Image (tube, helix red, strand yellow):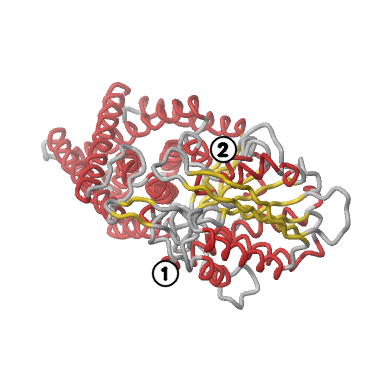
Amino acid sequence: MNRFRPFILIVTVVLSAFVAYGLWTIPKPQPADSEGFSSARVAADIEVISKEHHSVAQPQERARVRDYLIGRLKEIGADTVKVFRHDSLTGPQNKHVVYTFDAYNVIAEFSPLKESSDTTYLMLVAHYDSRYSQPVLKDTVWSYGAADNGYGVGVALETVSQLMKKRAEWTQGVKVLFTDAEEVGMMGMKALWEEQRDEFDDVGLLVNIEARGPWGPALLFEACPGNIKVMDLYRQTAEYPYTYSLTTVVYGFMPNFTDFTIVKDHIPGLNFSTVADINHYHTDLDNFSNISERSIQHYGEQILPLTQKYVTSDEYSDRNALYAESDAVNFTVPLLGMFNFSKTVYIIFNVVVFILFLLLFGLEGVRGRIKARDVFKKSCTILLAAFGMLALGELVAFVSAWSVGAKFNPFGIVMGVSFDNIVMVAATAVFLLIVIIVYAVMRARNVRQVSGAMRASAAAHAASRFAYGNLYGAMALMFILSVALLLAIDENFMFLIPLMCATVAMILYHLTSMRFWLIVSMVPVLLHAFSFLYALAMALTIGAYGAIMMFAFLDVMILLPLADLYLMPDKRR
């Protein structure tokens, strides 16, 4: 069995990466003749929408897009289509170029066949204007709006088209809102909210559809305050869920906004977007040739079942059905699905993990495998090394930006580095390889110092103690970071998951003497790390590469000792 363990370990890591990056966790595109949601039909709409630049600086081109969308809404079967004009708006704010324009918001209403004097509505929202001119390095470019926001309007059209197939079952109606002038400070949505507030009075759920880049999974990146009921609906219905409640927290501190920002404090809702690739965002690369039908399909597999449930369930006839006072804490682990907790349950879950870790830590100390002082020193060493990784990552980001003349924004958005993804993947591979080599060298040196290479049993004991020391040093650090983040922002899953998996694995390993638990525990850590760090890297770009590298290093410092213990020959336990 010993000789197969390295092969099993390699296969585990590789398959976890494939799963996390969408081999089985992002749906395949569906053709135009599909009975369900079809990315091909969405692509056909996008092809028309993205033929020309259609920002607030191009009123005629924008009018052609608007007329096309109005025609499509009528074709699908809208009962009414209303256009609201807002005259002489100016934007963007605080920019060198200021445009004066009229904004036109489009609202289509699809009522249930069952007559009611007090119908509640689902509202699908997407903006149809493309980005105005933007400097990228030495050029000034204009977006064609294929992804941002052809994805949004196309997905909304396909979703309502699919919902109409079951219109006889509706107890709620559907509104589709295509906003104008989102790219210049959400001015279309602001004007509509201020001047036609009654259009929102009967809305019980709002789904905003955005795109920040053409590729990758569609991320549910923001939910309304008091979202526990909304997130439970998403958990029950969405196929291929992909969300982290932490992104809602982080997004609240960022200077980026969407139409959802205007209404999220008043209407229960969800905000979806792709997050890769920043260099195709708001540039001329956002064109039809660069769209991803797989990403489009992922929107549909999440949004369509959620909206079907909403419009056909009597429980949502009350437009206040999804209002709540508390927020959910949630995260997604590819293949394992979405985990959704109330804050109270999440705190209890944390407490259970913490208690198990402390019990394990105490028992390991009693058995003589670890010493608290040594573990503390190891934790400090790992923390210092993590900060070193952060600094190295930011240095890589700075050099990458400098090499092409792009503006470097530490821990912020950096555009113009066309090879940023390649750099991040290559640098991560190199850094982690160095970490593995350093671990192996230090392990060998420790074994020589302790055993003097005189006895095989002494060498095995030294190797085991080295692995235990590193593992519990990393676990203790994860414990401290988990407690600190839980107290600070109620979010700590990026540290809690590795801590929980390692704790449970070590308990089961000691109870059963089966190394099987060690390799099993690595799988959710790998799945979570690959997926979460990918989302973080794409959302924050290479400017925040230091943070990505630091998180990756901390995960590896849990995984390496687990792998080491798994690979040790049985006779040397």
Q: Nearer the viewer, residue 430 or 167?
A: 167
Task: Using the image as rendered, state which of residue 194 and residue 292 is in the foreground.
Answer: 194
Q: Which residue is located at x 59 percent, y 54 percent?
A: 126
> 248 or 436: nearer the eye?
248
From the viewer's perspective, is 89 left or right of 408?
right
Q: In terms of image quadrants, where is residue 390?
A: top left
Q: What secondary structure is marked by label 2? A: strand
Q: Quadrant of the C terminus?
A: top left
Q: Is residue 447 left or right of residue 487?
A: left
Is residue 143 shown above or below 250? below
Determine the image quadrant of residue 255. Answer: top left
Res. 172 in view: yes
Q: Are marks 2 and 1 in contact (CB under 8 Å)?
A: no
- Give the amino acid type for the residue marked by disc 1 in the picture: Ser
Name which quarter of the figure residue 562 lies in.
top left
Apparent side of residue 407 relative to residue 341 in the rendered image (left or right) = left
- Residue 484: percent from the left, percent from the top? 44, 25
Residue shown at 24% from the left, 49% from the top: 427
Identity, as a three-letter code, of the amino acid under mark 2:
Val
The residue closer to the viewer here, 452 or 92, is 92
Taking the view exactly as shown, the residue that stands out farthest to the top is 373
For marks 2 and 1, give the one nearer the viewer: 1
Answer above or below: position of 397 versus 209: above
Please tell me which of labels 2 and 1 falls first in the chain: 1
Residue ID for mark 2:
329
Can you say whether 423 is above or below 190 in the image? Answer: below
Residue 24 in the image, given as x and y percentages of width and height: 48, 63
The residue that label 1 is drawn on is 289
Residue sitting at the far bottom: 33
